[in-house]
Image: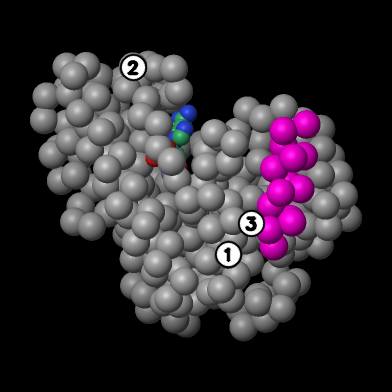
Amino acid sequence: MSAIDLHCHSSASDGTLSPTELVERAAWGAMTHLAITDHDTVAGLDEALAAAVGRLSLIPGIEVSTTWKSHQIHIVGLFIDHHAPAMSDLIAAQTSRREERAAALGAALEACGFAGITEAVRAEAGEGAVITRGTYARHLVRIGACATAEDAFKRYLKPGRPCHVVTEWASVAEAVGAIRAAGGVAVIAHPLHYDLSNHRLRQLVTDFADLGGEAMEVSFGPQRQGDADYLTRLCVSHGLLGSMGTDFHAPGGFRDLGLGLAIPGGIRPVWTHPAAAPYHFP
Ligand code: AMP
Ligand code: MN
Ligand code: MN
Ligand code: MN
């Protein structure tokens, strides 16, 4: 268990725990630093910051969906001023994309026989929560239509499947620009989860660094030595800092806060960045 986890989700997006419950779970696990990085929203952060007082250091974060060369790439922002105008503008634009996308996804699933799913998912997620494909996948599992969320993606939600909806998200430039304008550090999330060739991934990292991106996740949970070595080379050769986070969404799965995280030797952790200074990292 690591005492630091810089990527997780609350019920403000597609996590199941409220911001307070997430902070409590981290505190029970003796964690010292937690970043909450909900999809395209900062709505859970004020509650989380209040819950964290006297317990742990809560880092305001966000996970922004972007489109890069027709790939969906997630950019995490850490140490942000979550009320900064640049952040609010980006979130407003993403929120309308998200709402349109959630409705289109619901309509596609209704056409596949899941009558009333749009309303059911909205009610389940709660007032104001950001709806993702993960929210729909969890619902399909709950009603017994799919065995696992992975199964829901394979059958319905992935590109090429009947209910996939193409969305044009913010550009990487817009995401990095807003995060920097909010005083934060931009981080490429889970770089091995995009199915990019080695060449494509290098291109992404190069573009990202050219735009002012400063870090990349190099640890997302227990991983093979080969992956750690690959990510280390990629990170170091582009002069990026390394971040780590489990992408925890809900208890009961194979991921948990802090589980299996470590920054490989030779990489400078993202918390050595000046923007992290107020959070008292070791
Ligand atoms: P979206 O941003 O709406 O495209 O949804 C992305 C979210 O769906 C991720 O943050 C995960 O929560 C979830 N997700 C993506 N791929 C999978 C998968 N293969 N199995 C389970 N959940 C997934
Ligand atoms: Mn998610
Ligand atoms: Mn992600
Ligand atoms: Mn995530």
Horizontal side of 95 relative to 40 (left or right) equals left
Residue under the point 63% across and 28% down? 195
Asked whether 139 or 106 is in front, the reply is: 106
Q: Tag 2: Cα neighbours inside 10 Å, few (<14), some, or many (≥20)? A: some
Earlier in the chain: of badge 2 and badge 1, it is 2
Q: Earlier in the sequence, mark 1 or mark 3?
A: 1
Identify residue type, mark 3: Val
Q: Which residue is mark 2?
A: 162
Describe the element under mark 3 as helix, strand or loop. Answer: strand
The image quarter in which residue 196 lies: top right
- Which disc number belongs to residue 57? none
In the picture, the quarter occupied by the C terminus is bottom right
Picture coordinates of residue 190, whole percent (x, y): 62, 43
Amino acid under label 2? Pro
Q: Which residue is mark 1?
A: 177
> Which residue is under mark 3?
187
Q: Residue 85, image x and y in percent? A: 42, 76
Please provide the residue range marked out in magenta.
199-212
Residue situated in front as seen by the camera: 156 or 280: 156
Residue 56, visible in the rendered structure? no
Can you say whether 25 is above or below 119 in the image? below
Mark 1, secondary structure of its residue:
helix
The overriding secondary structure of the stretch rendered in magenta is: helix
User: Does residue 200 belong to the magenta stretch?
Assistant: yes
Name the residue at 34% across, 47% down. 97
**Res 7 → quadrant:** bottom right
Is residue 174 a member of the stretch shown in magenta?
Answer: no
Q: Nearer the viewer, mark 1 or mark 3?
A: 1
Q: Residue 18 at what x, y percent from top left?
A: 32, 59
| Above or below, comparing residue 189 to residue 29 in the picture | above
Count neighbours of disc 1 (C-alpha within 10 A) and say few if under 14, some if 14 to 19, many if 20 or more.
many
